[in-house]
Image (spheres, rainbow, N blue to C red):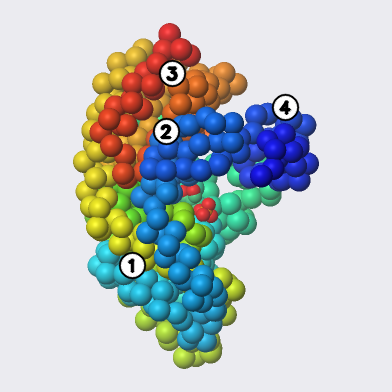
Amino acid sequence: MLRNDTLDQWDREAFFHPSTHLAQHAQGEAPNRVIRTASGCHIEDRDGNRFLDAFAGLYCVNVGYGRMEIAEAIAEQAKELAYYHAYVGHGTEASITLAKMILDRAPDGMSKVYFGLGGSDANETNVKLIWYYNNILGRPEKKKIISRWRGYHGSGLMTGSLTGLELFHKKFDLPLAQVIHTEAPYYLRRPDREMSEAAFVDHLVAELEALIEREGADTIAAFIGEPLMGTGGIVPPPEGYWPAIQKVLDRHDILLVADEVVTGFGRLGTMFGSDHYGIRPDLITIAKGLTSAYAPLSGSIVGDKMWKVLEQGTDENGPIGHGWTYSAHPIGAAAGIANLRLIDDLNLVENAGRVGRMFNEALQDAVGGHAHVAEVRGEGMIAAVEFQKDVAAGTFFDPGDKIGAQVAGKLLEHGVIGRAMPQGDILGFAPPFSLTESEAAEVADKTAKAVAAVLG
Ligand code: PLP
């Protein structure tokens, strides 16, 4: 086994990490961490530290770490058939079975599953399918995609454009011209503090209508949104938001993409976020929870309406010109099957709803009354605590104070991983669905200690 100091040196010399301050990492000025193993909700690093991972990696290890059922399914698949492609009608028992299992669980009106590797490429696929769809329908001008500020849809060229966070655009020449953004359904940050939740929804609808009017409905192909906004702050939508938005989109013949990379397969206590909020999507993006991150796999679930047109397209133009070498990779598919079976067998969606509710309540009890806590919010097994300088006046801290990051740092000292969300002083949680009641209480209790250490 390599020595820790050798690993540290090689890490600094050779490894280009995502979402990392490059110079500080390379020069050894920022801490690094080498994870060795994990089990249940806990991970262990090479220095012998053990943490309760209350963010499930990047909200993806939904069934928890160390599940031998999935590891064995991966090993069996690798031994029998590590790879074959999915082009020109090829498949494997694993990929075909998984497609069927996904459709059996999907909201009504879904027709087929296209497999990719991660959430970003699945959303790239979605945009290509949307453009293809409108070309086949003879509407070459209807191409723009509406996304929300603070939405997160990946970090490719198109998906990084859809993402509505400054860090993902700045100095990358994004967003691309085909992407336009509308306001986030973020009640705490409403434009007028006197606005009721219902009035805020009316305002968001009016903003969307105005955007469509300005651009022209005949130039807009689709609207993409996460049922519950994730990386942009972990923000459940205000009551009535989705039905109101859906109505506008239907009226203008604009497709709706539900990006369920975080919410798919149980995180809100329902199999899909679309079910939870009564959304009727034309496309659904899935990744993370599809395999609980035991292997990379994503998917675009295509609804009936689009599927019929895609079929017509290949009648007219030949095979669809879109594919990845690793589409429907058998090892990912085997992991997906074992993962979905485990979720069923252990009732993990129900657990995410029940323990998640307890966890949200425990967080509210622990820090909801603190003078600098503006909001404790969440749904199912996802939650956030947002800090403000003056809650009564609704003023935020100077971003340079890095309050969210400081609290997350203190929490880590107490052995719990939460995530300082990228835009605002927001501490996020998205534990594995297998979180126990006592682990939920422990996270809430240690969060209170971390908040007190930073903010008194
Ligand atoms: N969509 C959503 C809602 C996400 O949260 C993410 C990642 O966090 C993505 C897409 C991108 O997925 P990936 O990082 O697998 O490319």
Give above or below for 134 relative to 287: below
Labelled disc at residue 102: 1
Q: Secondary structure at mark 4?
A: loop
Quarter of the image for residue 17 reads top right
The residue sitting at 56% across, 40% down in the picture is: 35
Quarter of the figure with the C terminus? top left
The residue wearing badge 3 is: 450
Q: Is there a contact, CB below 8 Å, between mark 4 and mark 3?
A: no
| Residue 73 seen by the camera | yes
Question: Label 4 to label 2, Cα distance in Å?
Answer: 25 Å
- Above or below — where is 124 with respect to 261? below
Q: Residue 7 appears at what percent x and percent y?
A: 70, 40
Q: Secondary structure at mark 1?
A: helix
Query: Would you say residue 238 is visible in this rendering?
Result: no
Mark 2 Cα-neighbour bin, 10 Å: few <14, some 14–19, many ≥20? many
> Which label lies toward us, 4 or 2?
2
The tag on residue 29 is 4
Could you tell me which secondary element the residue under label 2 belongs to?
Answer: strand
CA–CA distance between discs 4 and 3? 24 Å
58 lies left or right of 384: right
Q: Which residue is mark 2?
A: 52
